[in-house]
Image (cartoon, grey):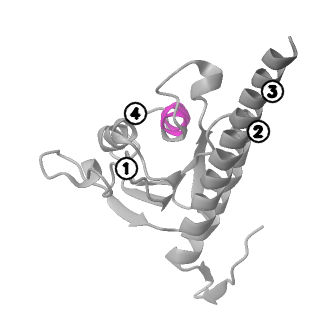
Amino acid sequence: MLLFLLTMLYGEMIVSQQELDIHYMQMALALAEQAEQHGEVPVGAVLVQKDKVVARGFNLNILNHDASAHAEMECIRAAGKVLDNYRLLDTTLYVTLEPCAMCAGAMVHARISRLVFGAADLKTGAAGSVLNLVNNEAFNHQLSVTSGVLAQECSEQLSAFFRRRRKEKKALKMAEKQKGLNE
């Protein structure tokens, strides 16, 4: 459900870019939840062209046994099929986590116009945190970047996932240790 106000001007609905960014990032967060339900790191992505969702994706690395099955890559692959083109011109990619080098490179090659991400990735982020591949002047295409959209929500979703995973691993170790003592 859209949670923003619409105003009418000359018969057209006018919505601020910030409101649209929040709306689409909420969609990406819901996709990240789907990834988590599959046991994946919760990252979701949505590709939009002319205010229409073209494709969606979420992490599928573990399920597909594929290091390249990041949310962004899944979304880019699906969009290419929908648009019948590997060039994703005049599109915006919304993703809950700052893209890695692989995903950033794919965005440049696909000619995505704009990247909007939630949480910064201080270890592998390639859209400004560690590297800035999406705005590297050595490449023949650069993306416009908006960072920090729903950053708190995106960060918390990831943090909660990793806290839960560490707790599960600790419980498993304790159970194995207990089992060894009982034998």
Circle 4 sits in a helix, a strand or a loop, which is it?
loop
Which quadrant, please, contains the C terminus? top right
Q: Is residue 136 above or below residue 50?
A: above
- Tag 1 residue: 125
Q: Earlier in the sequence, mark 4 or mark 3?
A: 4
Q: Disc number at residue 175?
A: 3
Q: Earlier in the sequence, mark 4 or mark 2?
A: 2
Q: Earlier in the sequence, mark 1 or mark 2?
A: 2
- Tag 4 residue: 86
Amino acid residing under circle 1: Gly
Q: Position of residue 101 (x, y in %)?
A: 33, 40
Q: Disc number at residue 37?
A: 2
Residue nearest the viewer, comparing 59 with 113:
59
Q: Position of residue 136 (x, y in %)?
A: 19, 51
Q: Are marks 1 and 3 in contact (CB under 8 Å)?
A: no
Amino acid residing under circle 4: Tyr
Q: Nearer the viewer, mark 1 or mark 4?
A: 1
Q: How many residues crowd mark 2 within 10 Å: few (<14), some (14–19), many (20+)?
A: few
Q: Are marks 1 and 4 in contact (CB under 8 Å)?
A: no
Q: Position of residue 106 (x, y in %)?
A: 36, 37
Q: How many residues crowd mark 3 within 10 Å: few (<14), some (14–19), many (20+)?
A: few
Please tell me which residue is depicted at 41% across the width and 56% down the height of the picture: 115
Amino acid residing under circle 3: Ala
